[in-house]
Amino acid sequence: MRAFNFSFPEGAPGGLDFLRGYVNAARPSPEDAATLVDVWSYTILQRFWPVDARYEQPGSYQERWDVFIREPSGWWEGNRERMRQELIRFAKAARA
């Protein structure tokens, strides 16, 4: 999940190449490829883990984790349907 997340930062053009390569290798059905949008939405949640640890487990929190706390941008939510259509297109092309 973390590799997927770091390979496709929000709005990065290389992310489509990563997803195209994944779909070409895995050859999911178009329906399954479309669910990758939901998987991505789940994986971006890991960005907020230091916030949870900081407030729920203050005794075990390490200050060096502060660099991982970032404000969510909303990019993915604004481009969700466009990405879903791209993944479906990649899956259809991989099966052709």
Image: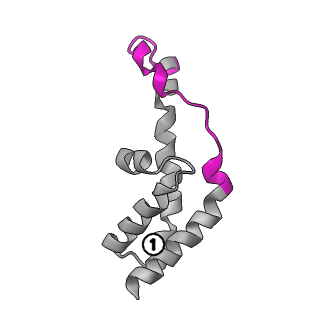
Describe residue 69's horizontal placement relative to residue 26 as left or right: right
Q: Amino acid at mark 1?
A: Asp
Q: Nearer the viewer, residue 81 or 16?
A: 16
Describe residue 36's horizontal placement relative to residue 60 as left or right: right
Q: Which quarter of the figure has residue 80? A: bottom right
Q: Which quarter of the figure has residue 28? A: bottom left
Residue 42 in picture, x, y percent from top left: 50, 49
Q: Nearer the viewer, residue 33 or 56?
A: 33
In the rendered image, the vertical position of residue 58 relative to residue 2, given as above or below: above
- The answer to whether residue 53 of the structure is visible from this angle is no
Q: Which residue corresponds to the image point at 65% horizontal and 45% vertical from the top-left?
A: 74
Q: How many marks?
A: 1
Q: Which residue corresponds to the image point at 46% horizontal and 51% vertical from the top-left?
A: 8
The residue identified by callout 1 is: 32
- Residue farthest to the left? 25
Q: Residues within 10 Å of mark 1 (few under 14, many from 20)?
A: some
Residue 45 in picture, x, y percent from top left: 51, 41
Q: Which residue corresponds to the image point at 47% horizontal and 23% vertical from the top-left?
A: 67
Does residue 23 belong to the magenta stretch? no
**Circle 1 sits in a helix, a strand or a loop, which is it?**
helix
Does residue 69 belong to the magenta stretch? yes
Q: Which quarter of the figure has residue 63? A: top left
Q: State which region is magenta.
A: 55-78
Residue 36 in picture, x, y percent from top left: 48, 63
